[in-house]
Amino acid sequence: MRKHKPSWLRVHENLLLGLVSLLLALAPSAAYAAGGAPHCSVPEIDGGFAVTALGQQAGGYAAMVFVMTADGNGNLSGTGTESLNGTVFSNVTVTGTYTASYGCFFTAALTDSLGNVNNFSGVIAQNGYELIGLSADAGTQMQFTAYRLKYTQCTLATIAMKYGAQVQSPLTPSGSSFANEEWAIQKVGTGTDSWVADYNGTISQGTATATFSVNSNCTYTETVTNNDGSIGHYFGVGGIKLNDVGWVRMATDSGWVSLTTGYFR
Amino acid sequence: MKKKKTSPLLPLGKAVFALSAFLIAALSSARADEPCKLATLTGPYVFTTLGQEAGGYAATFFVLTSDGNGNLSGSGTESLNGTIISNVTATGTYTADYSCEFTATTTDELGNVRDLAGTIIQKGGRIDGISTGPGTDFQFTAFLQHRDVCTVSSGAGYIVSDIRSALTPYGSSTAAEQWNISKKGTGTGNWVANYGGTIAQGTATATFNTNDDCTYTEAVTRSDGTTANYYGAKGLDGFDTVIWLAIETDNGWASISTITLLCSYWPRC
C-alpha cells in the first residue's frame, strides 16, 4: 500500500527544506563561533591578487605594486612596477613560490625580471582574501599587503566610484610625505580630486583632475594634474573590492617612493 | 468562453512591487551621493595617529566622542618619542563639509594641539587623514565604535594584528600576528616581526582586561621572553572588518596595532 506523506509535511515541505539548507550553510560558521580552528592551505590561495610592498630595501626606500596570479599550487607570476630609492622600473615581471600553513601563515619568495629576490611572510586574513605581512630578508624592512581581486577582467567602469585615499610616501623630492585624497572617478576614465598633503611638516592642499587608462588585467595608469600645475603619474591595480579597499597604486615619477590605498567612500 | 481568473490582490501586489523597487532605487541613489554634515559624525570614535610630531616619533590613541555638532571629547594614551602618557583627556572641534572633507583640532590636557584633515568614508564609519600642524608628519585613522558596551568575551575568536611601529628599542618595526582569543580573556598567538631589518618570529600568550566601555588592556608574553603591553578599544565591528585598535604602552615604543578578523564570513573558515 502506498504511504502518503502527513499533511503537515506536505504543507511545510519547502519550508523544512529551506531550514535544512540554511543549517547546512551555517554549519561552518557555527563551528568557528564555537571555537573551531580556522585552517588555510595552498589551494585556497588562488586567483588574482594586487600585491604591494613599501619600506626599505638595499639601503634605500622601495615601493612595489604587482598584479599576481596564484595558481593554487604554490606558484606565483605577475607583472608590475617598482621604485627602488626613487628609480622607477615599469613592466617588471615576477615569478615566485608561496606556502600557506594550516595555521594561516604564509611565505612568499619572489624573483623579478631585474634579478631582485624578495621574501615575505605574514598572516592570511579575511578568509584568504587578504595577506598581511612583512619582508623577511635581512637588511630589509617592508610592509606587505596582498588583496585578492574580485574581477578577472576590468574596464574603466570597474574603478568608477568615489574613494578616499591614503598616500604614504617615504621618499619624495620634498622629503617624506603623507597625503589624503578624495576622488570621484567617472566611467569615461576621468576623475576629480581634492587633496591635502604634509611634506615633512609643510602642509599643502588643492584640487586635481586625472585621466585613467585601465588594462583588461585590472592594472591601470593614471595621470594627475594638480591645480598648482604639478603633474603626477601612477601605476595601480583596481578591481579589488575587498570590503573597503578598491585599488592600490604607486607613483611612477622618478624620485618618488609612494604607495596609495583607495577606500570606497 | 472560459474567463481567465484574476486575483483581486494582483493590482495591489504590482503596486507594492513597484513601490519597493522605487524605494530601493531611491535609497541606493541617496547612499551613493549622500552628503556629509556635522551630524554624520556622531558617537564614539577611536582615533589613532602614527608618525612624527614635536621632533620625534609619536603614536596616539584616543576614544573621542563626537556630539554631532562639531565637538569632540574623550581620553586616551600617547607615546611621544617613546614616553608613554596614559589617561590623557582631550577636547576638540571638527568640521565635516558637504563633500565629506573633514578637519579637526584637538587639544590634550598636556597642551598638545593636533590639527587634522582628511576624508569621511563609509557614511561616517571611518575617517582617514593626515596631520596639518606645522612640524608634524603623521597619518590618522578614526573608526566609529559601533558597540558601546563590551565584555571580556567580546571579539573572542581568531584575529589578525597588523602592527606598525615607528619607534622601538630596536629601530622601526613591522609585525604581523595571529591570535586565538578565548572568551575568558586569554589568548595564544603566532607572530613574525621585522625589527630594523632583523627578522624574528615565535609564539605568544596574552591576557586581556576588558572595560565596560570597550577599552581594554592586554599583557603579552612572547616565546623569546619579551613582554609587551597594550591599550586598545574593541567594538569597532564596522563594514571594513577592523574590529580593534591598540597602542603599545611600553616606554620606548611608538606603535599602533590594527586588528581584523582572520575569518570574517563563512564558509571558508
Image (tube, coloured by chain):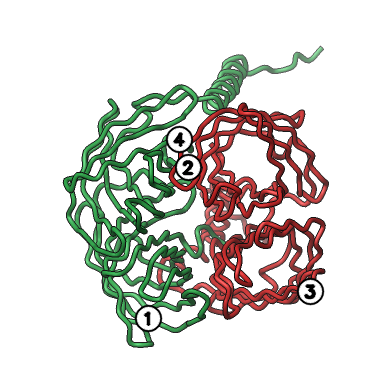
Chain colours: A red, B green
Q: Which mark is residue A115?
A: 3
Q: Residue at x 34, y 60 (%)?
A: B246
Foreground mark, 2 or 4? 2
SS at mark 3? Answer: loop
Task: Please determine if labels 4 and 3 lie on a single subunit.
Answer: no
Q: Secondary structure at mark 4?
A: strand
- The percent coordinates of residue A66 (x first, y second) are 72, 59
**Is residue A165 positioned above or below B263 on the image?**
above
**Which residue is nearer to you in this view: A254 or A160?**
A254
Q: Which residue is mark 4?
A: B120
- The CA distance from mark 1 to mark 3 is 36 Å
Q: Name the front one of labels 1 and 3.
A: 3
Q: Which mark is residue B204?
A: 1
Asked if labels 1 and 3 share a chain, the reply is no
Check disc 2 and report its element: helix, strand or loop.
Answer: strand
- Is residue B230 in sight in this rendering? yes
Q: Quadrant of residue B184?
A: bottom left
In this rendering, would A153 be left or right of A52? right
> Which of disc 1 and disc 4 is earlier in sequence?
4
Residue type highlighted by circle 4: Ile
Q: Mark 1 falls within which chain?
A: B
Give the side of residue A86 with respect to residue B124, left or right.
right
Q: CA distance from mark 1 to mark 2?
A: 37 Å
Percent of width and height locating residue B211: 20, 58
- To the question of a shared chain for discs 4 and 1, the answer is yes
Q: Earlier in the sequence, mark 3 or mark 2?
A: 3
Q: Is residue B31 left or right of residue A109?
A: left
Q: State the quadrant of the N terminus of chain B.
A: top right
Q: Residue at x 61, y 60 (%)?
A: A129
